[in-house]
Image: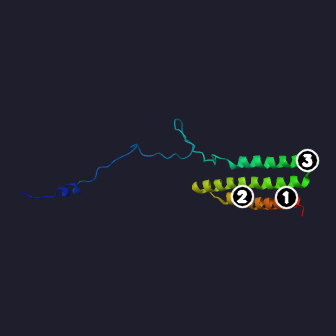
Amino acid sequence: MEAKAPWTETENNPPQQVVVGSLRPQQFIAGQPSEGQNILYVGTPKFNPETNFRHISYMVLASAIGVFLLFVLLLQEEDMGCGLCCGIFGVGLMFDAAYYSGRSTWQSQHGESTSGSTIGLIGDLLLALACLAIAFFILVDELLGF
């Protein structure tokens, strides 16, 4: 009687093959599809954030213009209107920068170029800081009378 280890018997047998899916070979279509073949169009994903800071920035910018017109036309306070308008405009640009930040993150997750979003983000931040600084100096001059 010959003694064999139980694992040696299975080593000689090839492993079973498991097939998941179709056994038909894949077909590659070159040129125009013929009749009866379906075409699947996969669209590129669009950036659609849950909280769209771009729309919020539009509303803030419109309110800046409204505040300016209110102070200039009704209250005859041009300097105060300019200062408030410039400050609110800076806040609107900050919301736009938040939009570009989210868009840049989304683009990097999807393997797209983020250069346009980064330039928009930097431009918005620089303009917002300039607007807020101008608003600060106008409002300090108006309120404290320097």
SS for callout 2:
helix
Q: Which of marks 2 and 1 is nearer the N terminus?
A: 2
Q: Which mark is residue 139?
A: 1
- Earlier in the chain: of badge 3 and badge 1, it is 3
The quadrant of the image that shows the N terminus is: bottom left
Secondary element at tag 3? loop
Q: Residue 75: which numbered mark, if any?
A: 3
Q: What residue type is labelled 1?
A: Leu
Residue topped by disc 2:
120
Of all residues, the one furthest to the front in this rendering is 144
Position of residue 141 in the picture relative to residue 126 (left or right)? right
**Left or right of 118 in this view: 111:** left
In the image, taking residue 113 as reference, residue 19 lies left or right, namely: left
Mark 1 lies on a secondary structure that is helix
Q: Farthest residue in the right direction?
A: 76
Name the foreground residue: 1 vs 26: 1
Image location of residue 132, percent across then percent down: 79, 59
- Quadrant where the C terminus sits is bottom right
Looking at the image, is 43 positioned above or below residue 36? below
Residue at the image position 60 percent from the left and 57 percent from the top: 108
Distance from disc 3 to disc 1, alpha carbons, whole Å, reads: 16 Å
Give the residue type that dot 2 points to: Gly
Looking at the rendered structure, the kind of residue marked 3 is: Leu
Furthest residue to the left? 1
Tell which of 103 and 61 is nearer to you.
61
Image spot of residue 99 (x, y percent): 68, 52
